[in-house]
Image: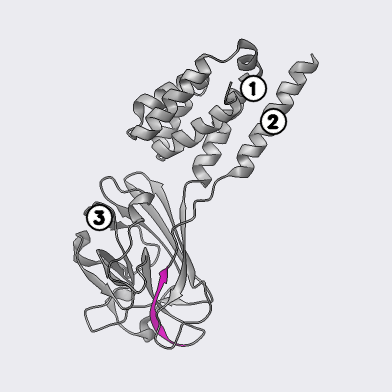
Amino acid sequence: MSESLTALAIRAVRLHVKCFPQAADLKQGLCHSNSIRKSIEWWKTSCTTGATRDLAFGSAQRISKAPWKEVMINRRLLVLLPLVLVLAAATAWADSYQLTIDHCTGGCGAIPFGTITTSNIVGGVHVELTLNDGNKFVLTGPAGGGSTIAFNLVNNPTIILANPSLPGWSIDNGGVPGVIHFDGFGEFEYSLNCCFGQNGGGNAFGSALQLDILGAGITTASFNELSTGGSPSVFFAVDIFSTVTGNTGPVGTGNPPTVPEPASLITLGLALVGLGAAKRYRK
């Protein structure tokens, strides 16, 4: 075979989490984990992404032609697959952005200024933003204007801001895409405001924020759209008050997001499978 059943099972794990990040779908998928072939067939017909359907179909075909002995040896993987699947879904497929570009007047200190992490949830995306060095969220600009966090979304959906972990946060334009200018970073479609709408460094508040962005079809991939007309254009811009320099201004994310994967979990699962196979051969 060109690909082992072990590799196919890992592909199945990744396929399932990509198609079904929601907990309800995850539980349904586990009902099929007693058969790798049945699992992949189910994921193939249920997933709405054409590329992943094709991947699953090809995997299922190869499994159906696997030698009986290899199938029996790898049956132990079926016992471990639900555990690996659950742990992988809980820890992987989150996008992480680093705030590394400084457009503060006079500078806001050393990079990175913070991290933004997005992860899929039911109905949208969970966002976590942590600022470094005690920097704080701020709202600057003319009275009644300005923005604290700005971003774009693919396909321009109408969104809802939900469950902010800090008080005093709101969304511009009622969640409808508009044109929001962020000094140095160009124009964005969406923005969030902190600090009960109060401008200036004296009203800066909070260094760690969690919230949910809800809307039809929104996933972590929806955030992978740059601002327009920026120098440079970025995925996120954040207005901060620097406790290091005392300055305020926007900082941005310069590079595409990184996507951590639970390699240690997969390695552990494969090691246990290998021990089971070796024991079978000794018998």
The Cα atoms of the two marked residues, 2 and 1, are separated by 9 Å
The Cα atoms of the two marked residues, 2 and 3, are separated by 44 Å
Residue 20 visible in the current orientation: no
> In the structure shown, which secondary structural element does the residue marked by tag 3 occupy?
loop
Residue sitting at x 67%, y 27%: 273
Q: Which region is colored magenta?
A: 246-253
Which residue is label 1 attached to?
Answer: 76
Q: Closer to the camera, 169 or 259?
A: 259
Most distant residue in the right direction:
282
Most distant residue in the front direction:
2
> In the structure shown, which secondary structural element does the residue marked by tag 2 occupy?
helix
In the image, residue 247 lies in the stretch drawn in magenta: yes
What's the amino acid at mark 3? Ile
**Disc on res. 3:** none
Is residue 239 found left or right of 61 in the rendered image? left
What's the amino acid at mark 1? Arg
Image marks 2 and 1: residues in contact by CB distance under 8 Å: yes
**Disc on res. 272:** 2
Q: Position of residue 155 (x, y in %)?
A: 24, 51
Is residue 86 found left or right of 202 in the rendered image? right
What's the amino acid at mark 2? Leu
Marked residue nearer the N-terminal end (2 or 1): 1
Task: Point out the image quarter for the N terminus.
Answer: top right
**Disc on res. 159:** 3
